[in-house]
Image (tube, rainbow, N blue to C red):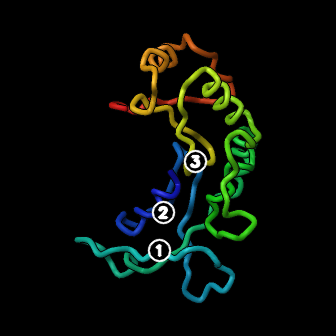
Amino acid sequence: RTATLWKRIPFLPKADAYCSEGGGRIFYPTEVSGAESYHGPTFLPQTYDGASETDLAPFGLREDSEWRQTMEGTAGKDGFRGMELVQSAATDVPVPVSDRSGLLWEFCRQLEAKGLIADTKGYSTCFRVNLKQQKDAQLFEELLSGGLVDIPSDLATSTNLGC
């Protein structure tokens, strides 16, 4: 989840890029001191062994807008509401999956119509189907074996070990 990444960034070593949602969103560090045009959150890295002064300097994030446009082609724009770096009254309320446009959310609704429970909270470009959340484990196994639905060719799936 992007929100989880944002909470963990202060505890991670500074990186050239941060990816969330299985690579669906990409963020780059940006300087915040003296940057009057930056209006997003400021991250304050926590001290760790071997950290330099530069590593511990506060920084902001900017989203890779080209990559986001690519993702919007499949995931639509609706899922980003409520998950923006800069919140406003117009963007702070997430759009329910039932109202989201895009192939990704059509597929999610298809799985839900089959009886699966999808975890969509905090996601813009993906969702999770976790065995622990399912009422019918057999249905979940059928999904994993490829017998439940055809996955649209423009989407990709992954499986977390132990989930």
85 sits to left or right of 133: right
User: Which picture quadrant has residue 137?
Assistant: top left
Q: Which residue is nearer to you in this view: 135 or 66?
A: 135
Could you say which disc has been placed on residue 123 in the image?
3
Which amino acid does the dot numbered 2 rest on? Trp
Could you say which disc has been placed on residue 43 in the image?
1
Determine the CA span between mark 1 and mark 2. Answer: 8 Å
Q: Is residue 26 above or below residue 22?
A: below
| Relative image position of residue 34 (x, y in whole percent) | 59, 89
Q: Residue at x 42, y 80 (%)?
A: 57
- Nearest to viewer (mark 3 / mark 1): 3
| Relative image position of residue 35 (x, y in whole percent) | 62, 84
Determine contact: label 1, label 2, CB under 8 Å: yes
Q: Residues within 10 Å of mark 3 (few under 14, many from 20)?
A: many
What secondary structure is marked by label 2? helix
Q: Which residue is nearer to you in this view: 2 or 130?
A: 130
Determine the CA span between mark 3 and mark 1. Answer: 21 Å
Q: Residue at x 35, y 66 (%)?
A: 11
List the residue tagged with mark 2: 6
